[in-house]
């Protein structure tokens, strides 16, 4: 294997406020590996809280490139031998680059190299921010007019009855056929989540699911919410905090929200999805606001999985700049897979 690494930064269109502070730009590392006679690319755009820091990611990748000074290191060994166990973003970049190169060598899109019968396009959800009812309804109507039939609302920053009022206003505006999700980003305790879910039931909101109402390590609490309420529960933050086997075994989720770039790569998500499927748990693939290479990787992984739930991949519009033109823009609430081999992007476009 020959490995090259280059740093990049992309700016967000508008700063995104998160629990960990405002994000104005995303800094990452692109990896190119030569495997099986082809060059594949991968991306690490670390997000502390979900992954290692940028510095730790850069060090991990620099270490690999050094080990590979002779160019004959086995590309799979750092993925298997635990070298990158504490660096999921770095592991994602290498795993994606190797998978991309192998798919290119096979002359197939990455999704088709991962699964014999992949989707050729996928529904994606629009994410609505944390505005008041009027602005939320306006954003919902705009999204539905442009073709989305699944909307995700951020909740948890206000009283749960006010969040339910926002959801009810959106439901009234968009009608019964649009699927609604709520993401609390671990903001609540049991009492607050119970109040929210009781109010959701009274309002007949018919949510697709409530995502991560409780702190990441509270699997028993999420399992109790599933037992006591009708609304399906999804786990997101929990998957970066506890082993996935435990999340599944505790009956804490109807849906697992999987970010390949935080979980260590496409192979990790495929393994996780197989275990989830055996337990009757659905998988939705999302991103951490990444550049085009990682977004395409997530799109191919999502397309390789069964099921027809909308994925959380429509995050390109959050960026003001990108590494290259996006070959899979959102149209009518869906993303179509690029036709070309591998990720479907020219390596020379991102690795000049
Ligand atoms: Mg989430």
Image (cartoon, rainbow, N blue to C red):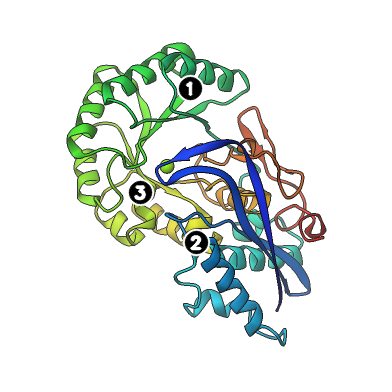
Element marked by disc 1: loop
- Residue bearing mark 2: 53
Q: Mark 1 and mark 2: span between their CA atoms? A: 38 Å
- Of circles 3 and 2, the one toward us is 2
Q: Nearer the viewer, residue 334 or 53?
A: 53
Does residue 117 show up?
no
218 up-or-down from 4: above or below? above
- Residue bearing mark 3: 280
Q: Mark 3 and mark 2: span between their CA atoms? A: 34 Å
Residue drawn at the location 60% of the way across and 18% of the way down: 145
**Residue 188: x and y, percent?**
26, 37
**Residue 325: x and y, percent?**
76, 44
- Residue bearing mark 1: 178
- Of circles 1 and 2, the one toward us is 2
144 up-or-down from 193: above or below? above
Residue drawn at the location 42% of the way across and 12% of the way down: 172
* Number of numbered discs on residues: 3
The N terminus lies in quadrant: bottom right
Q: Is residue 157 left or right of residue 259?
A: left
Can you tell which quarter of the image residue 6 is in? bottom right
Can you tell which quarter of the image residue 273 is in? bottom left
Q: Earlier in the sequence, mark 1 or mark 2?
A: 2
The C terminus lies in quadrant: bottom right
């Amino acid at each position: 294997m020959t490995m090259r690494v280059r740093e990049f930064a992309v700016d967000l269109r508008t700063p995104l406020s998160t629990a960990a502070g405002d994000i104005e730009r995303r800094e990452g590392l692109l990896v190119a590996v030569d495997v099986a006679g082809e060059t594949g690319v991968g991306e690490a755009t670390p997000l502390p809280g979900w992954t290692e820091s940028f510095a730790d990611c850069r060090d991990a990748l620099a270490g690999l490139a050094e080990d590979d000074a002779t160019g004959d290191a086995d590309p799979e060994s750092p993925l298997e031998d635990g070298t990158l166990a504490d660096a999921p973003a770095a592991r994602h970049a290498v795993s994606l680059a190797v998978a991309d190169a192998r798919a290119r060598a096979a002359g197939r899109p990455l999704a088709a190299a991962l699964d014999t019968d992949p989707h050729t396009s996928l529904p994606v959800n629009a994410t609505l921010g944390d505005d008041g009812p009027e602005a939320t309804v306006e954003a919902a109507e705009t999204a539905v007019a442009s073709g989305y039939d699944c909307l995700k609302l951020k909740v948890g920053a206000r009283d749960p009855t006010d969040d339910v009022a926002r959801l009810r206003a959106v439901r009234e505006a968009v009608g019964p056929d649009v699927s609604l999700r709520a993401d609390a980003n671990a903001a609540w305790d049991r009492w607050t989540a119970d109040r929210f879910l009781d109010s959701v039931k009274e309002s007949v909101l018919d949510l697709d699911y409530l995502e991560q109402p409780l702190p990441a390590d509270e699997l028993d609490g999420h399992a109790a919410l599933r037992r006591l309420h009708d609304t399906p529960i999804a786990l997101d933050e929990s998957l970066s905090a506890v082993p996935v086997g435990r999340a599944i075994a505790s009956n804490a989720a109807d849906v697992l929200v999987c970010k390949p770039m935080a979980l260590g790569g496409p192979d990790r998500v495929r393994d996780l999805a197989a275990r989830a499927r055996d337990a009757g748990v659905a998988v939705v693939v999302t991103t951490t606001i990444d550049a085009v290479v990682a977004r395409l990787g997530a799109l191919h992984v999502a397309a390789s999985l069964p099921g027809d739930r909308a994925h959380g991949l429509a995050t390109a519009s959050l960026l003001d700049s990108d590494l290259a033109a996006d070959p899979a823009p959102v149209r009518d609430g869906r993303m179509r897979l690029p036709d070309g081999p591998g990720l479907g992007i020219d390596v020379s476009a991102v690795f000049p």
